[in-house]
Image (cartoon, rainbow, N blue to C red):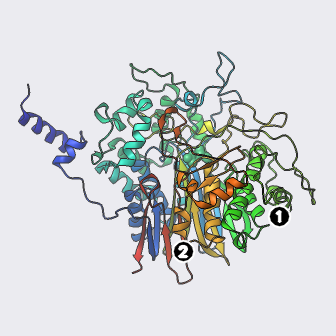
Amino acid sequence: MRSRRFVNALAAVLLAAGLVTGAAACAQTPPQKHPVTKTSVARGHGGAVVSDTAESTQAGLDVLRSGGTAADAAVAVASTLGVTDPYVAGIGGGGYLVYYDALTHQVSTIDGRETAPGADGAGMFLDPATGQPLSYPAAVTSGLSVGVPGTLATWQRALQRWGRYGLAEDLRPAEQVAERGFVVDATFREQTRQNAKRFAQFDSTAKLFLPGGVLPAVGSTLRNPDLAKTYREIGERGIGALYGGSIGVDVVNAVQHPPLTPRATLVARPGPMALSDLRAYQALDVDPTHVNYRGLDVYGMALSSSGGITDGEALNILGNFELPAMSRGQALHHYLEATRLAFADRNRYLGDSHYLDVPQQQLLSPSFARQRACLIDPVKAGTSPVAPGELVTGSRPCTPSGAAVTVPDHEHHTNHFVVTDGAGNVVSYTNTLEEWGGSGIVVPGRGFLLNNELTDFNFTPTQDSAPDPNLPAAGKRPRSSMSPTIVLKNGQPFLAVGSPGGTTIITTVLQILVNRVDFGMTLPDAIAAPRASQRNTPTTQAEPAFLAESTTHDLQALGHKFTINDTSPLDPTIKVSPEIGIASGLEFFPDGTVLAAGEPTRRGGSAAGVIFPTR
Ligand code: GLU
């Protein structure tokens, strides 16, 4: 048997060489202390960041302090999240960025959604052997589900338009965190636990996230030198390293030949992504959606995300009612009914607008909202599925049109963060891999997970005889629900807000706006409040704390039925937290201060920070 001394000496050498991490290593070398500790609320001026982890918020604040703009800081935050929140963020995924430019007072957006490879078609999720749709778990953990990633192109586009520094500078903080490592907390360990079975199927994934074949211990340090190297290469060579270069070659290999271990028990179907798909990728400049709600200008994300249109329609519907004058139960009833109706329209009409004519203007018109609002019965919950509205010009009678259909609906897990700089520019950015851990495939030698975003397509037609707007097609972007939002009051920033949570994102953002604007809650309270999410389904998903509120009995008396969702969509035997959304936001005050607010408890709490705190 080897002596203890030999083992310790070996450990010291490996540690010095940076080759081992873990609880044992930690016990000998305490991890570096970080200046930002997690706190969900901060107020001050000179710039602010709210993100999921202390390291990413710190990276953003450091870039702001060094003179970077909100766009520079956003790239620093997002790339650091790729290290510290790697199951929901990173260059293997996509997302949507909304930007307020303090100089022009314009709100702009970038669509960095993943696209289907050119060889994909409407039947991509049908099993060729049976003609039947694949099960959701089988589709997720595969090369087939991987869309051409858009995150890196989004960063590049944001820096071209609004950045002061280049990608190399803005990636440096993340590179350092990847090199140095971060301390595993209970949230990260739990997310790894939920994914452990499938992560163990891929050599590259197990090596990174199951060091030594086990779950990383709370308090251990997780390093990602491969990702540090990848970020360095991108800094030196530009985004072409991924979009056609050597990183792209590795991505394509991983998609076409998922790196299963020889002991794998899972069939991970390959995908058709080619280098030409990566070369062709573009992040798109898209006009934001806009509605006016009680005098506020609400800007959101247009298609390929359904977020801005669906939230906009729901706000327009709610604009027909005096929520502040209602009892809380009545106001919540209207909130739930507005999204029930808006989701019927979303599911029928919304998909990638480069592939179909989407009647965005009509869906966001006050007359359409009136036509929908009159269907809300003040004393009775609607019965879902309700039918979508009829799209015609002029006023219509209070009747729905078409058939009511149900649409498969998965909740997923990503991240949202907000940044503002000293000049008053604002970023609201939701980025994602889709499921927790995306496709489960880490690109060998590159240190990042690939998304499974293409499972956001409908696998088979969902609209009876009407066309389904969200079927897969070559080059198409799957319909998203991500809803990064910026609200202006008298032309100046008032709120920036967003959340992860798949289709619940839309209701979470709406609920926060209603809480803040109609119920007069502070932004931290509006975010912390218990949530419920009605998406045109027979029951309304709710958090346990929402069910415990007395007003919920009033809602039940109106016929609302609630369910709690606490199982993993990948494996019903795995229990997950029944949280809805993990929001973050900013509120701007006339005295020039900003309130940065995130989650006090959901997913371990957010990290909020400001440059100059107010005492
Ligand atoms: N794939 C989801 C969407 O685009 C985002 C994932 C999540 O929010 O958790 O809507």
Please identify the quarter of the rendering in which residue 296 is found. bottom right
Q: In this view of the protein, can residue 13 be seen by the observer?
A: yes
Q: Secondary structure at mark 1?
A: helix
Q: Marks 2 and 1, Cα distance to the nearest angstrom?
A: 31 Å
CB at disc 2 and ligand 1 closer than 8 Å: no
Q: Residue at x 84, y 50 (%)?
A: 389
Question: On the rendered image, what quadrant is the C terminus found in?
Answer: bottom left
Is 282 rendered above or below residue 567? below
Q: Residue at x 67, y 16 (%)?
A: 130
Q: Residues within 10 Å of mark 2 (few under 14, many from 20)?
A: many
Q: Residues within 10 Å of mark 1 (few under 14, many from 20)?
A: some
Most distant residue in the bottom direction: 591
Three-letter amino acid code at disc 1? Pro
**Residue that label 2 marks:** 424
Q: Secondary structure at mark 2?
A: loop
Residue 366 numbered tag: 1
**Relative horizontal placement of residue 405, taking residue 119 as reference (left or right):** right
Q: In this view of the protein, can residue 113 be seen by the observer?
A: no
Q: Nearer the viewer, residue 118 or 495?
A: 495
Three-letter amino acid code at disc 2? Gly
Measured from the top left, where is residue 350 in percent x and y?
75, 47
